[in-house]
Image: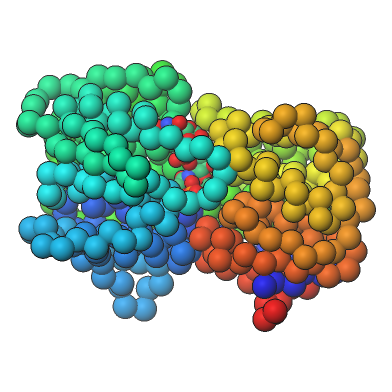
């Protein structure tokens, strides 16, 4: 468990780790290109460890660079292992990113339904449409699904998604990579995580052109040198730390980010009257000079390019509890998220009006009181830590394994900024 008590305003500098949600598809992309790839800034979060174990279980060799934390070499197997071990696939959502690499390696991919955060129904129908567009055969069973590679074909594969699914966009891109075919994908997801994969592939012989409506992927000259990819800094970890700093009225420098990934989060903080700026890959949060506006925050999760990532919504909700105004929150992308988060915030005394299972409204500032709470998913855990920093008394957070799935050490980073936080054994 983690125990959190309110204390002085957070201050100082802290660096974020690489993004878990960018590292996962980048590792799958490294597997899909079937050549040695170097990846840097790979976070040590539990889901990333599971992905590495899956790659190794399927025959890839993963070598840790000596003395360089977070720097890995991913090397493709010549032949598939006789008994692949994909036992951890049900534990993470992103196991589905491995389908294209497995098709290239062994002609089929049999996987359990993806796990990850329990935040509502999480379909794979669009992934299956992608594979069928490439001529693959998909079979679904109670426990999971199987994709079998169709006959080798040539020519451009053209399809349009009905909505901008991040997972289905990555599936289409990586399936194109392993088949060596060009892709024209309508209504792609253009989140920083997808763009990070496209950027990485550009150093491995693929060229992507994107507009809001279409993603075109074509082959280009394959460079001889080993592609070296860098996982972008975790925008969600940075946003969570920014909310924590702002909630305590502190000033801090959050390093290791790309400014463009944080624009929607900065817009939300600005609306609340909390000044932020980006300089030299650092987000500066000036909570000490906040001028609360009392304006309503509208934190609506969206898959649209440049919109608010769903994973920013929980820490913003925790912050908004301390900010004047009536604030609205919605996440229809992850329909079970509010069902996890709201009851836990209620244990701290938060009064939140549920308009529907995916929309809610709250009026701040509210006085919270420490209590025993549970991290029922990654972002519920991190949001509860933000809320606990302003709650009177001690908050104990259980379910820390959930938190660690997404962040190698979020409590350590808060501690570094001066939070009164420690691990306790119940
Ligand atoms: C590992 C990872 O990066 N997870 C992120 C990813 O999740 P995830 O991979 O679920 O994101 P998608 O954009 O693919 O899915 C969005 C929604 O569409 C649904 N859907 C998706 C594909 C499909 O074939 N059928 C279908 O119904 C999903 O169940 C989900 O409700 O993006 C979410 C939205 O930004 C984030 O909250 C998650 O943290
Ligand atoms: C929902 C998340 O992850 P996953 O999709 O892997 O469950 C998350 O990162 O908050």
Which quarter shows the C terminus? Answer: bottom right
**Quadrant assignment, res 140:** top left
Q: How is the image coloured?
A: rainbow
Q: Looking at this rendering, what residue extends furthest in the bottom direction?
A: 425
Q: Position of residue 53 (x, y in %)?
A: 32, 65
- In this image, 272 relative to 170: left or right? right
Q: Position of residue 175 (x, y in %)?
A: 23, 36
Q: Looking at this rendering, what residue extends furthest in the front direction?
A: 142
Q: Position of residue 382 (x, y in %)?
A: 66, 57
Q: Position of residue 271 (x, y in %)?
A: 78, 35
42 vs 46, nearest the viewer:
46
Q: At x 88% / y 60%, what residue is drawn? A: 369
**Quadrant assignment, res 222:** top left
Query: Number of labelled discs?
Result: 0
Which quarter shows the N terminus? Answer: bottom right
In the image, residue 84 above or below residue 421 = above
98 vs 276, nearest the viewer:
98
Q: At x 34% / y 47%, what residue is drawn? A: 143
**Quadrant assignment, res 253:** bottom right
Residue 371 in view in this figure: yes
In the image, residue 158 above or below residue 245 = above
In the image, residue 265 above or below residue 75 = above
Q: At x 41% / y 60%, what residue is drawn? A: 48
251 vs 405, nearest the viewer:
405
Residue 246 in view in this figure: no
376 vs 272, nearest the viewer:
376
Q: At x 44% / y 42%, what residue is drawn? A: 193
């Amino acid at each position: 468990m983690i125990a959190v008590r309110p204390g002085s305003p957070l201050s100082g500098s802290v660096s974020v780790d690489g993004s878990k949600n960018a590292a996962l598809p980048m590792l799958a992309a490294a597997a899909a290109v079937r050549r040695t790839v170097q990846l840097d800034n790979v976070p040590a979060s539990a889901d990333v460890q599971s992905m590495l174990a899956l790659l190794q279980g399927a025959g890839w060799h993963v070598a840790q660079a000596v003395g360089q934390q977070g720097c890995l070499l991913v090397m493709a197997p010549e032949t598939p292992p006789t008994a692949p071990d994909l036992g951890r696939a049900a534990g993470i959502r992103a196991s589905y990113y491995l389908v294209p690499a497995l098709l290239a390696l062994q002609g089929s991919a049999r996987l359990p339904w993806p796990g990850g955060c329990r935040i509502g129904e999480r379909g794979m129908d669009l992934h299956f449409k992608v594979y069928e567009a490439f001529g693959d055969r998909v079979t679904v069973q109670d426990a999971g699904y199987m994709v079998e590679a169709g006959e080798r074909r040539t020519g451009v594969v053209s399809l349009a998604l009905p909505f901008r699914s991040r997972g289905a966009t990555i599936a289409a891109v990586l399936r194109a990579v392993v088949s060596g075919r060009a892709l024209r994908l309508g209504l792609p997801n253009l989140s920083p995580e997808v763009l990070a994969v496209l950027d990485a592939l550009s150093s491995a012989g693929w060229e992507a052109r994107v507009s809001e409506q279409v993603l075109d992927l074509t082959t280009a000259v394959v460079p001889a040198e080993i592609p070296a990819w860098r996982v972008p800094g975790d925008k969600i970890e940075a946003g969570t730390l920014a909310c924590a700093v702002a909630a305590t009225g502190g000033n801090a420098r959050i390093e290791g980010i790309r400014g463009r990934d944080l624009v929607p989060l900065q817009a939300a903080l600005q609306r609340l009257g909390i000044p932020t700026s980006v300089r030299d890959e650092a987000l500066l949060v000036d909570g000490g000079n906040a001028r609360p506006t009392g304006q309503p925050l509208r934190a609506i999760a969206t898959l649209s390019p440049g919109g608010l990532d769903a994973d920013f919504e929980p820490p913003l909700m925790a912050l908004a509890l301390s900010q004047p105004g009536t604030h609205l929150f919605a996440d229809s992308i992850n329909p079970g998220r509010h069902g996890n988060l709201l009851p836990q915030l209620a244990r701290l005394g938060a009064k939140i009006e549920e308009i529907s299972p995916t929309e809610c409204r709250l009026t701040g500032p509210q006085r919270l009181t420490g209590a025993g709470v549970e991290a029922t998913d990654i972002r519920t855990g991190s949001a509860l830590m933000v809320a606990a920093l302003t709650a009177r008394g001690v908050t104990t957070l259980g379910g820390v394994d959930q938190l660690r799935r997404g962040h190698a050490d979020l409590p350590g980073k808060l501690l570094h900024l001066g939070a009164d936080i420690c691990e306790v054994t119940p």
